[in-house]
Amino acid sequence: MQVVSDKLIVTLHEGQQQALRSPKRIVLVLAGTQGGKTSFGPVWLYQEIQRRGPGDYLVVTPVYPLLELKALPVFRRYFEEMLRLGTYTATPTRRFTMSDAGARRTFGYIPDTPTRVLFGYAADPDSLESATVKAAWLDEAGQRKFKLESWEAIQRRLAIYRGRVLITTTPYDLGWIKTHVYDRWRAGDPEIDVVHFESIANPAFPRDEYERARATLPSWKFDLFYRAIFTRPAGLVYDSFDPQRHVVIPFEIPHHWKVLVGIDFGGVHTAAVFLASDPQTGILYCFAVYRGGRCSIAEHVQQLTTIIGHRSCIAVGGSLGEDQWRREMAAAGFPVVAPKIHQVDIGIERVYARFKQDRLVIFASCVELIAELETYRYALDAYGRPVSEIEDKHDYHVLDALRYVVSYHDHPITSSLRHSVSYYAY
């Protein structure tokens, strides 16, 4: 971008031009590092402001430090320094407000409604639950700190105006960007467009640096960060899970199949998975997932029983010290038994073996579970080798629920325990 004779000249490479021309409601730009994705965001957003008119718009990054390091400086250079459209302020909230002169240049008149660009961060989904916006730019949304709950909150903010959204990111792993956007685009969703370009699509990116990375990095890391190709990173806990074999189109669960519910309790992130056991094959089918926010026990029970319907089931969940949760669930009419296996590594092995033996299958509609399976991994050391610690282990509530119920189902029941286990009809 440069100013020549008081005119702003914006030069875009082919991938950026393709994204700018796309008319789709969701435009996902998957780009290699330094491929020109963040610098493109303000250009797209200003075009959207010109199209949609006065009102509120949104810029979101995973965390505030990333906003201040990358997206905000690029935004301010384009909107404040080059276009001179208005002023950014950091308090009491981070926002850019368009001036009267900027509005006249943009719309041809001074509207009664002010035009603002609001800035948020996705590590805290609650921070995104206030504004009603006409368009949003999400930068580096593929990072782990950019929560699925934030993506859902942003869509609610856009709903009134059916606003468009631009996502610019490197594919850091196989998270919700893949399951909720990329995979739906591949399945033919008419509202989604995906634009892909490698680092060297940017003419300023050195070819020798690209080749050095190819020669020295693990292939999975090079594919993710320089070629912008989704690939399985090192250290995946459930590398026995294969979406081609273990994800199926949903079907009606026969009423006589046994149903089991796994629950992970939490004041903010209560989660549950619903499994049905085929009596002929012994295969477990995960047919539903529940994620509850700040709800009362009674509200959780109501939503869980709605999913179960008129079926008998057994519910398993909670850690060793969560007896109070189980007592309160029982008092609300939903008995939950404690898992028989509390060691995380043993529970993981039970789930791992089920996938390895093709005895655990997931409905394609259970996107939350699929996303967690494809990102749940061991931390890596300085040499890129997995260590025993789970990375961000407290973020995987749906997988914890799955571990509880599978390890319970596959644990041999002794004669003394057999009398204490009962199935509850709803």
Image (cartoon, rainbow, N blue to C red):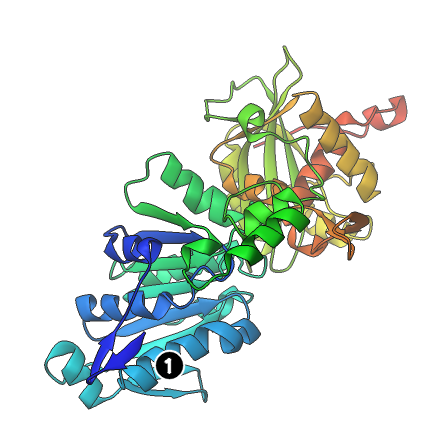
Kindly identify the residue that appears in the image at 10 percent across and 83 percent down.
109
Q: Is residue 107 left or right of residue 344?
A: left
Kindly identify the residue that appears in the image at 63 percent across and 43 percent down.
219
18 or 86: which is nearer to us?
18
Kindly identify the residue that appears in the image at 75 percent across and 54 percent down.
324
Question: From this viewpoint, is residue 295 visible?
Answer: no
Q: Is residue 159 left or right of residue 353?
A: left
Callout 1 crowding tier (Cα within 10 Å): few <14, some 14–19, many ≥20: some
Q: Amino acid at mark 1?
A: Arg
Q: Where is 163 relative to 211, above or below?
A: below
Kindly identify the residue that appears in the image at 51 percent across and 48 percent down.
227
Image location (x, y in percent) of residue 406: 71, 32
Question: From this viewpoint, is residue 401 visible?
Answer: yes
Q: Which residue position is annotated with label 1?
A: 77
Where's the C terminus, which quadrant? top right
Image location (x, y in percent) of residue 355: 67, 27
Where's the N terminus, which quadrant? bottom left
Q: Secondary structure at mark 1?
A: helix
Image location (x, y in percent) of residue 396: 65, 49
Q: Where is 392 relative to 263, above or below?
A: below
Q: Where is 35 relative to 345, above or below?
A: below
Q: Is residue 350 left or right of residue 34?
A: right
